[in-house]
Image (tube, rainbow, N blue to C red):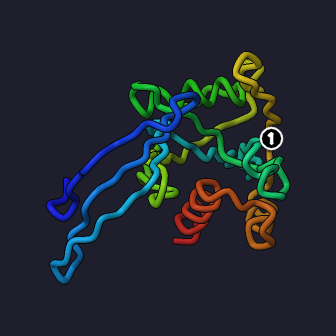
Amino acid sequence: MSERYRPVSQEVLSDNWGTLTKHTFDYVRGDGTVERQVREVYDRGHAVACLLHDPAADTFLLTRQFRLPMQVAGLDPFLIEVPAGLLEGADPTARMRSELMEETGYEVGALDHVADLVMSPGSVTESLACYLGHYTRENRVGQGGGLAGEGEDIEVLHLPVTEAAAMVERGEIHDAKTVVLIQTFLLRRAG
């Protein structure tokens, strides 16, 4: 914890799907002055995400699903994304494998951890472990589609790499974790 952060109080505003807490604290600015600040922080835990590539077909395994916050913001609520999920206390690689099975029905081999990212550090505590991996159509061993009991209704997509890259350029794929992983893949392939 930073010596420049001095907690004053915390108030839980909501503890439903995640925990929303109001923090009052004193912040020591770079010039040494102390400033009282109030911020709200949302905590859903840490998460994992993975982009899978089929080298033979040159496709990515992606998903499309409804996202309420995008609907509320007036944007297209059906986002194209990499498979992802909350850690819920599990080992990141093991959790990623179970998320891949749950969302896509695919069981895969080695996963390459490429980064731990923070997506919205101004208000959300989440750190996201990001992976790249390979798949083939023969790796499909389950139905996928997510868990209906969790309200999931996930469409599995096999997008050609060139099409996915063009969709990022046109802003049709704009989920941050997905864009970062697609660009990481493309940079590695070019290098």
Query: Where is residue 38 shown, x and y percent of the image?
Result: 39, 58
Q: Is residue 156 rendered to the left or right of residue 121?
A: right
Q: Residues within 10 Å of mark 1 (few under 14, many from 20)?
A: some
Q: Nearer the viewer, residue 10 or 30?
A: 10
Q: Is residue 93 visible?
A: yes
Disc 1 on helix, strand or loop?
strand
Query: Where is residue 41 shown, x and y percent of the image?
Result: 45, 48
Q: Is residue 130 rendered to the left or right of residue 58?
A: left
Query: Which residue position holds label 1?
Result: 66
The relative height of residue 26 versus residue 77 in the rendered view (above or below) is below
Residue at x 81% of width, y 63% of height: 172
Q: Is residue 111 visible?
A: no
Q: Nearer the viewer, residue 5 or 184?
A: 5
Looking at the image, the residue that sits furthest to the bottom is 31
Q: Nearer the viewer, residue 36 or 78?
A: 36
Query: Where is residue 134 shown, x and y percent of the image?
Result: 60, 42
Query: Where is residue 178 shown, x and y percent of the image?
Result: 64, 54
Badge 1 amino acid = Phe
Q: Nearer the viewer, residue 38 or 44?
A: 38
Residue at x 19% of width, y 59% of height: 2
Q: Is residue 28 rendered to the left or right of residue 97?
A: left
Residue at x 79% of width, y 36% of height: 156
Count every numbered label the image shows and give the total.
Answer: 1
Residue at x 82% of width, y 35% of height: 155
Q: Residue 184, located in which quarter of the rendered image?
A: bottom right
Q: Residue 89, located in which quarter of the rendered image?
A: top left
The relative height of residue 98 versus residue 46 in the rendered view (above or below) is above
